[in-house]
Image (cartoon, rainbow, N blue to C red):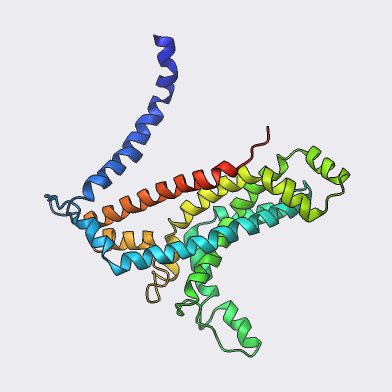
């Protein structure tokens, strides 16, 4: 009996940690989503589905969902395509490729606040480096973060710049795991570089792509710091992401019930999205045995 229980005793501390800091807060969020609470009041009256009804009939909620969806639809394919292209060039183990990989990975481990502050200066309308260069060319300054048509693309650029290094490292590992026998066979058959990439490299790197797809979509729906520092969700709600709305409701307006309801809706949406990806894309993933 003791021998059978030993493996469970080893994982018991981790399970306890997860129970206290992960599962209990999730259950509490679900509980609070059906109540009205402002952080200060000792009472938490039950309001049923009123918080969910308030969100689903709110124009701000649907705007945040649309902005976040557009952000994910643009940033995720852009991140993966750029990362795969860069990793393909840096796959060889040379001194230059190692230095380049380290330089590209550096933003991934840099403080997000620092990156957002620096790019706020870079894209500043009055004294930004980009507008300074544009002025030298004789063109008018561009209100990058004040124009609702441009602000979201600035956020996409900054987020891609920060996360690209992580994706490149993962793709590099995936590409290096592909056996050279496949490329030798393709060379014997006279395959061109594009066809070798399409028929050999891309199918065999699909497990890595699927992993990065799941991670990057979740990351896209949790973007907060860059938006909070650079635009605060503006202008006119053009960059108001779901998590920014959640923070504003819960920790600015102190409407914990509605904020918890929004967190639960986001959780359910991400779970459903992961299941759809598993059924649609997961079946097409080829694992090299």
Picture residue at 76% right of the left edge, 38% below the top: 179
Position of 285 with respect to 86 (left or right) is: left
Q: Quadrant of the N terminus?
A: top left
Image vertical order of residue 104 relative to residue 207, above or below: below
Q: Is residue 277 visible?
A: yes
Q: Nearer the viewer, residue 101 or 203?
A: 203
Compared with 270, 180 (above or below) is above
Question: Residue 81: x and y, percent?
Answer: 63, 58
The answer to whether 130 appears left or right of 93 in the picture is left
Pinpoint residue 150: horizontal percent, then vertical percent.
Answer: 50, 76
Residue furthest out toward the top:
1
Residue at position x 71%, y 55% from top?
Answer: 100
Q: How far across and down, in percent of the image, does residue 38 sit?
A: 18, 56
In this view of the protein, can residue 90 be seen by the observer? no
- Residue at image position (64%, 59%) is 82
Q: Position of residue 14 (x, y in %)?
A: 40, 30
Q: Residue at x 63, y 82 (%)?
A: 133
Q: Nearer the viewer, residue 14 or 82?
A: 82
Splitting the image into 4 quarters, where does residue 12 fall?
Answer: top left
The C terminus sits in image quarter: top right
Count of marks placed on residues: 0
Quadrant position of residue 185: top right
| 80 lies left or right of 253 | right
């Amino acid at each position: 009996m003791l021998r059978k229980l030993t493996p469970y005793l080893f994982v018991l501390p981790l399970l306890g940690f997860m129970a206290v800091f992960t599962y209990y807060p999730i259950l509490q969020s679900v509980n609070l989503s059906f109540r009205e609470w402002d952080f200060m009041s000792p009472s938490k009256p039950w309001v049923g589905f009123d918080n969910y009804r308030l969100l689903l009939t709110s124009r701000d909620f649907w705007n945040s969902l649309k902005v976040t969806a557009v952000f994910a639809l643009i940033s995720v394919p852009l991140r993966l395509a750029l990362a795969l292209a860069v990793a393909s060039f840096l796959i060889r183990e040379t001194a230059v490729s190692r230095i380049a990989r380290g330089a590209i990975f550096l933003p991934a481990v840099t403080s997000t606040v620092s990156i957002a502050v620096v790019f706020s200066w870079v894209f500043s309308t009055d004294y930004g480096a980009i507008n300074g260069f544009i002025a030298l060319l004789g063109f008018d300054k561009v209100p990058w973060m004040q124009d609702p048509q441009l602000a979201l693309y600035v956020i996409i650029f900054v987020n891609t710049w920060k996360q690209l290094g992580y994706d490149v490292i993962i793709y590099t590992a995936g590409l290096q795991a592909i056996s050279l026998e496949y490329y030798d066979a393709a060379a014997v058959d006279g395959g061109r570089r594009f066809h070798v990439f399409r028929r050999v490299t891309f199918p065999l790197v699909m497990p890595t792509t699927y992993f990065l797809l799941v991670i990057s979509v979740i990351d896209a729906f949790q973007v907060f710091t860059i938006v909070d520092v650079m635009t605060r969700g503006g202008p006119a709600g053009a960059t108001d992401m779901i998590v920014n709305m959640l923070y504003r409701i819960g920790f600015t307006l102190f409407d914990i019930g509605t904020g918890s309801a929004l967190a639960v809706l986001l959780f359910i949406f991400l779970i459903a999205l992961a299941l759809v990806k598993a059924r649609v894309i997961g079946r097409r993933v080829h694992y090299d045995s």
